[in-house]
Image: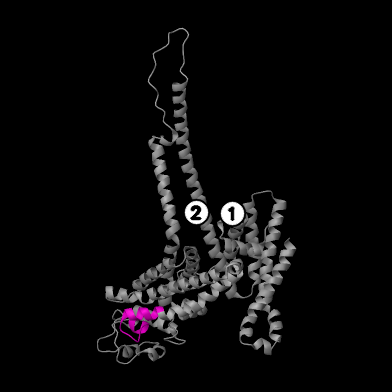
């Protein structure tokens, strides 16, 4: 089992990585002109290191789990936890690509936090339900005892041979179980406590993903405007393209974000433009003016610098918000439509073959719904600051954090099943960005080999839940883990 898993994982990882490298060459038709690119990709060090990482991860987990079962007849929770940690320690350093290694670590940590929290929540819910069942059981037992005594007194009267028959007694009132309530004050207090706990659990289930998403987006917005240099270049480019501001400032959308943050932190007039200057004249005084001036219009004057950068073609903030939605919506569609189509082809092929019209309709609706969510979130973040400035009368850091908190509420447009996924992704990004800001400010330092420790711990948590409580994991992700790790 261990050897088969090792060899199979190496071949699959090697083939998949090579195929992914070939996609750009196929789209650009370079592969047909240079067939040697395929051989070069399959022989590349990056492809081999990824295949080695995947095979070591699966093979070492299977081997460690079998060895622990043979040597120690302990708890299966302990076996799977130790095997997952060992597999993470062995495999993570075999991947030479640091960016991919960091991405994989973040993904695994997010999944471990998600399903670990679900597992703890389920255990808490089960404990509360057991306590409620115990209280109801004691009440029913007391009621049953009352019914039994009443039946004996009414149906089986006792006669004495030494005394005459006593006159008939009035019938004893029988109180059935469904009408019986435990009257002890302690039981009432505990039952009320249980009911309150169940109400809290319902609130947590309904509101936790939205609250986590809102807080995470608030942190990301703070870093995006006021510590732009901390963000990885690829992630910053994605945010710039997804917001639609790459259309206003080609290749310089990040400069627009930096300029807004610079004006808030270092501007002398609370972000206001002096009355005797137009927007273009004031922007010409900013450090990155060369990147912003092509989008500025002559003769237009905005009240605030941020308004002049966010919607330079109009002084109306509401028109600017509408323009932001219209800019972001097509960009979001180009992101979500291929992503949802890939999920449909990989994990829901049976639905596509059984009822293709319904599957395609759901695909279109899901893609549009996700795109509307993203466009509303961007507009809430970017143009929501216009509303804050109108109310407060100045630009401030707290105002942008508040717009991030409000913009994160756009996740309510999404399906409930997707809110947790989005919230966990943004949460991990927020933690990563906040950590980098703290390192930049000197509040703390990077920990050596923290990536290895995080990946190993995440593997331990995930494998423990996968082996012992698979119902905790969503069906889609559980099917992925089954295909990768098999049934052990």
**Label total for image:** 2
User: Can residue 140 be seen?
Assistant: yes
Instruction: Using the image, tell me which numbered label, if any, was put on residue 469.
Output: 1
Please provide percent x and percent y for residue 375.
42, 75
Q: Is residue 380 above or below residue 82?
A: below
Instruction: Using the image, tell me which numbered label, if any, was put on residue 121.
Output: 2
At 34% from the left and 72% from the top, the residue drawn is: 399
Local crowd at mark 1 within 10 Å, few (<14), some, or many (≥20)?
few
At 66% from the left and 78% from the top, the residue drawn is: 19
Q: Tell whether label 1 touches label 2 (CB within 8 Å).
A: no
Magenta stretch, main secondary structure, is: helix
Q: Quadrant of residue 87?
A: bottom right
Quarter of the image with the N terminus is bottom right
**Residue range (magenta):** 307-325
Q: For residue 31: magenta? A: no
Q: Quadrant of residue 328?
A: bottom left
């Amino acid at each position: 089992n261990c050897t088969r898993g090792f060899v199979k994982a190496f071949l699959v990882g090697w083939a998949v990585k090579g195929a992914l490298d070939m996609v750009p060459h196929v789209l650009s038709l370079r592969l047909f002109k240079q067939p040697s690119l395929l051989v070069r990709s399959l022989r590349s060090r990056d492809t081999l290191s990824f295949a080695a990482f995947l095979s070591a991860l699966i093979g070492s987990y299977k081997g460690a789990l079998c060895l622990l079962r043979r040597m120690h007849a302990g708890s299966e929770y302990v076996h799977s936890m130790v095997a997952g940690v060992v597999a993470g320690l062995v495999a993570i350093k075999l991947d030479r690509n640091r960016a991919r290694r960091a991405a994989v670590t973040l993904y695994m940590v997010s999944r471990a936090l998600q399903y670990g929290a679900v597992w703890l929540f389920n255990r808490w819910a089960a404990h509360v339900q057991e306590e409620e069942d115990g209280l109801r059981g004691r009440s029913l037992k007391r009621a049953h005892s009352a019914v039994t005594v009443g039946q004996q007194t009414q149906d089986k009267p006792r006669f004495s041979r030494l005394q005459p028959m006593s006159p008939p007694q009035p019938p004893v009132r029988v109180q059935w179980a469904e009408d019986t309530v435990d009257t002890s004050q302690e039981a009432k207090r505990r039952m009320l406590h249980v009911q309150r706990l169940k109400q809290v659990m319902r609130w947590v289930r309904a509101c936790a993903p939205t609250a986590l998403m809102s807080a995470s987006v608030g942190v990301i917005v703070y870093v995006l405007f006021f510590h732009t240099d901390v963000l990885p270049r690829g992630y910053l480019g994605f945010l710039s393209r997804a917001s639609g501001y790459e259309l206003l400032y080609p290749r310089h959308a990040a400069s627009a974000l930096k300029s807004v943050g610079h004006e808030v932190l270092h501007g002398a007039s609370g972000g206001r433009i002096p009355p005797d200057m137009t927007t273009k004249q004031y922007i010409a005084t900013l450090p990155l003016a060369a990147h912003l001036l092509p989008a500025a219009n002559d003769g237009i004057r905005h009240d605030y610098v941020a308004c002049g950068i966010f919607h330079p073609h109009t002084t109306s903030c509401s028109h600017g918000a509408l323009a932001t939605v219209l800019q972001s919506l097509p960009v979001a569609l180009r992101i979500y439509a291929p992503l949802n189509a890939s999920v449909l082809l990989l994990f829901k092929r049976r639905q596509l073959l059984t009822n293709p019209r319904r599957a395609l309709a759901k695909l279109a609706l899901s893609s549009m719904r996700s795109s509307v969510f993203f466009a509303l979130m961007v507009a809430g973040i970017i143009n929501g600051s216009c509303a804050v400035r109108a109310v407060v009368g100045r630009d401030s850091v707290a105002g942008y954090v508040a717009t991030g908190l409000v913009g994160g509420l756009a996740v309510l447009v999404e399906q409930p099943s997707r809110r947790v996924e989005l919230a966990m992704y943004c949460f991990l990004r927020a933690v990563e960005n906040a950590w980098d800001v703290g390192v930049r400010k000197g509040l703390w330092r990077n920990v050596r080999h923290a990536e290895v420790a995080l990946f190993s711990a995440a593997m331990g948590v995930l494998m423990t839940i996968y082996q012992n409580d698979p119902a905790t994991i969503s069906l889609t992700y559980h099917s992925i883990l089954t295909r990768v790790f098999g049934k052990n």
